[in-house]
Image: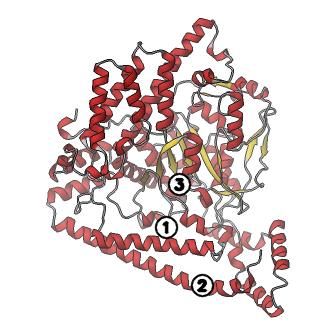
Amino acid sequence: MGHGITHSLLKFPILLVVGIILLVEVVLYALLRIIVSFYENIVSHYFTCSKNRQLHYELTHANTFEEFENAARELDAIEGRNKWKERPSYGHADYDYTLINEWIDTLKHQRNAQDYKSLMRTLQSIFASDNPAGINNDSLYNQTHFGTKQLINDFIAVVLECLVVIRDTEEIDLTERLSFFKRARQSYGRTALLLSGGAALGYFHVGVIKALHHAKLLPQVMAGASAGALMSSFVGVRTDEELERDLLTPDSYKYFTACEEPKYVLFWRYIRTSFTTKPSKAQLAAKRREEEQSEDEETDCWKKTKDILYNITRIRKVQGHMFDVERWEKAMKAVTMGNTTFAEAYAKTGRIINVSLTPAHSNSPPVILNYRTSPDVIIWSAVLASAAFPGVIQPVSIRWRDPNTGEIKPLLIHGSRWADGSLKADIPTKQIAKSWNAHHLIVSQTNPHALPFFYNTGTTGRSNIHKHGSGLRGGFIMNALEKLLKSDMKKWIALLGELNLLPQFLGADWRVIFTQPLTGDITIVPRANPLHFMRVITDPNRERMEDYIIRGERAVWPSLVRISNHVRFEKMLSQSYDMLRHIQLQRVEKNMGVSINNLQVNAGNDATLLFDSDNYTADTSSDASSERSDASPIRTLSQASNTKTANGSNGVPKSRRTRRPPRKNSGQHVSISTQTDSHKG
């Protein structure tokens, strides 16, 4: 639809004015950061003792979690922060310490009195929220270098003890206990790890994954776009043993070879494809419609002027690409272990991979692929499509395997081509929360346009050396200016997008890219230096991969206690539910005299207790695939929901459901103690 003469006349002047404003604000923001860094260095050098400076250095340059923990605990002791941990009422506005004390007393009384019915009701009220009494608030974890209030540690310990009591007691019917844990698990939710895009900066994700894996805190649900999709898929197709061998080592650089071509080859390929690629039929038809609709309101003189401006600015619509698709296909297959599908990966590892894609048609919404919505889609093709950023890789089609014939075919829905998931859903928080009941989202953010603006720390595990955890870098005035400049830059970009003034450079909507959500409940931001940004489209060698990994780990360590405090409840609820369900299934098997694997259960209330979507999945063997009547390669969330209602489990036909074997944990274990020094043991 045409915008008229006024829009066309004012578009470029407004763009020029706003562009100048944004440029000035970026320069001011950079100067402000330099001033704050200088201020902090002066304070740390002249107003802290040499012992503190040494410990701060050890904290930021630790090579293992144990080194980090020791330095953090010693710093807390020297700076007097343990007193904050031991005094529940200090900073009481950050959480409801009175309610926590009441819960602890009530739980202990009901447990000692063996009043299990009342104990279950109290626990249910606690798990009605994924953040009971505010114990997971960020402000409770940025006051110290390690840990949080001792009262919170005591509360978590008491709740876990009571859950074990409910799980093991025989005075309450098994079905009632199973129903309790099912409801509590549903209301408390689960944790998901979301990995952003970022090209070569995405290699920081390897260190993030390693730190979480070694601490036994790697979530089952993982999602990613572009580089994040690559890393989540690398993890999702491998068992713990394979993960340790292939990814969590500097030698993993051998898998990442897609950018090994010389830079001059990339440059000339981009030039060649930019001026040889013809516009599509849809683009030509849209241009003709726009011309016809604006014909009546434009004079001949203005039409000629507009054609001249269009020809001058045509370069912004050129959509060449630097990299060879076939080379990237080969690299993606090595990462995802060949033609593995989403359903096969889940059946093998139990991990849930979610890949974010953007249809090449700019008006289509983003799509999330996983084993429920697209069980037969080939993972490497989804990852390749999710990495197809304009100018880097041309939009590609994704492939699926026909379960009836085993033939691999292109998937032709939402258009035939797909582009980078970061364009519209870099961090798909709403989609993941809705699809997987994920109430707690951990985001690893490595986008080059986002990293420079994650600067106002005083965040989890990173107490400010001069403000004692207030979170105001450089003091109130500097912090206020920093936030003002960031919000004002977002405002101008959003305004240009709303008025349809932002150029569609390389066919991407840059307003969405710069204004979409970039954070989660916990946001992990590795510290990158200018060299990392210069190598944003360069493959790593062993030395650089080692640097990526250790920087990613260091970014996670300050948040491990907070993540652990949330995941401990989640794991106890899930493990207790699985244990009780296993007992129930054994009883059913014994009473009926048949194997559980051959048991057919009708959909209904009983079936929801016997079968669960996280432990029963599609059998991807050829025999089971040949029996499948629905050969659709991809389903929308609504279709998956309807199939779940009909079949009793997440859209997988009953004939293909099979029990997934327990996952093996072979990774190095890092013990996370949340106690203060006086209680550590």
- Nearer to us: label 1 or label 3: 3
Q: Earlier in the sequence, mark 2 or mark 3?
A: 2
Q: Nearer the viewer, residue 368 or 104?
A: 104
Describe residue 273's horizontal placement relative to residue 19 as left or right.
Answer: right
Q: Position of residue 193 (x, y in %)?
A: 49, 45
Residue occupying image coordinates x 69% and y 20%: 602
Looking at numbered disc 2 in the image, what kind of residue is underneath it? Ile
Foreground pick, 27 / 437? 437
Total tally of numbered discs in the picture: 3
Looking at the picture, how far across and down is residue 658, in whole percent? Answer: 64, 23
Which SS class for mark 1?
Answer: helix
Residue 115: image location, x then y, percent: 34, 19
Whole-angstrom CA distance, mark 2 to mark 3, is: 32 Å
Q: Which residue is mark 1?
A: 534
Name the residue tied to disc 3: 196
Amino acid beneath label 1? Met
How crowded is the residue under tag 1: few (<14 C-alpha within 10 Å), some, or many (20+)? few
* First-in-chain label (1 vs 3): 3
What is the quadrant of residue 56 in the picture? bottom left
Q: Earlier in the sequence, mark 1 or mark 2?
A: 2
Figure quadrant of the N terminus? bottom right
Mark 2, secondary structure of its residue? helix
Observer-nearest of 549 and 562: 562
The picture quadrant where one finds residue 646 is top right
> Is residue 593 toward the left or the right of residue 50 in the image?
right
Q: CA distance from mark 1 to mark 2?
A: 32 Å
Kindly state the secondary structure of the residue where label 3 is placed.
Answer: loop
Q: Mark 3 is on which residue type?
A: Ser
Residue at x 77%, y 55% (from the top left corner) = 415
Q: Residue at x 31, y 61 (%)?
A: 471
In the rendered image, which residue does mark 2 sit on? Answer: 14
